[in-house]
Image (cartoon, helix red, strand yellow):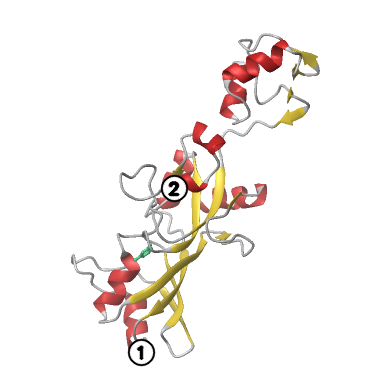
Amino acid sequence: MRIDKFLSEMGIATRKEAASAAKRGGVLINGVPQKDTAKHIDPELDEVIYLGRKIEYAKFRYIMLNKPEGYVSATEDGRDPTVLELLPPEYMNFNLFPCGRLDKNTLGLMLITDDGELSHRLLSPKRHVDKKYYFHSKFPISEEDASRLETGVILDDGYETKPSKIELLGDGNEGYITLNEGKYHQIKRMLDSVGNKITYLERVTFGPLSLDPSLERGEWRPLTDEEITALRNAAK
Ligand code: URA
């Protein structure tokens, strides 16, 4: 890969900035200044130092975001801001997209990546990756309705939901629901099917990932190496 392409793909410098830094001796390849950024390197093997900073090669990016209300889980939207707009501009060099969808008014854990294959596997119905949500409902959920929701209910389009898990809290109008599928507005439609209504929804886990409590709404951080490994294992 060309040095300038590597630096721009890693979100470090534009090709122009890289060329100008290299001319000034600011780009070292394996410890040796390289003035020509059109030269090729092996990003997995060669050490690149840009203006004194060692640049690690990452093939893909994995970001945990605490989604706020009002943002849509899309790469582009003519009307509403997208979750990608919460990331800093240097991330726009990558083909990032949200892995799965949360409704505009749903909050919480969103994975953003440019690893299409992993994302596809995590979302595949074959893999049954669990997603856990904290919810509030308009009315308390009876034990009987909880057990219907867990076994499977018929949604407004005739789809029968797969088994889920419900943990009720307080008076029964809040709790956790865990699904391993993700149909359009699924939890809202499940509650509708038992004559109830979701009034608050927040995703707290996605497979092995848990929403980092130190992230405020709208904040994000890269996944740790351990989290990436756990995700890959969940997608096997
Ligand atoms: N179910 C919903 O109804 N909405 C979401 O955003 C996620 C799951």
Residue 32 position by quadrant: top right
Answer whether labels 2 and 1 touch (C-beta < 8 Å): no
Q: Position of residue 156 (x, y in %)?
A: 19, 69
Q: Which disc number belongs to residue 61?
A: none
Where is the N terminus found, in terms of image quarters?
Answer: top right
Q: Which residue: 69% across, 32% down?
A: 56
Q: Which residue: 37% across, 77% down?
A: 150
Q: Is residue 1 visible?
A: no
Mark 1 residue element: loop
> Of marks 2 and 1, which one's residue comes earlier in the chain?
2
Q: Nearer the viewer, residue 200 or 166?
A: 200
For residue 79, side relative to residue 13 (left or right):
left
Name the mark nearer the viewer: 2 or 1: 2
Question: Ligand 1 quadrant?
Answer: bottom left
> Alpha-carbon neighbours of circle 1 within 10 Å: few (<14), some, or many (≥20)?
some
Q: Amino acid at mark 2?
A: Pro
Q: Nearer the viewer, residue 146 or 88?
A: 88
Query: In the picture shown, does residue 175 fall above or below 74?
Result: below
For residue 97, side relative to residue 32 (left or right):
left
Q: Position of residue 50 (x, y in %)?
A: 72, 24
Q: Position of residue 166 (x, y in %)?
A: 43, 78
Q: Which residue: 49% across, 88% down?
A: 170
Mark 2 residue element: strand
Q: Amino acid at mark 1?
A: Ser
**How far separated are the C-alphas under marks 2 and 1?**
35 Å
Residue lying at the far right of the rendered structure: 31
Tell me the residue that label 2 is attached to: 98
Tell me the residue that label 1 is attached to: 142
Query: In the picture shown, does residue 116 fall above or below 227?
Result: above
Residue lying at the far left of the rendered structure: 157
For residue 43, side relative to residue 195 (left or right):
right
Q: Nearer the viewer, residue 164 or 47?
A: 47
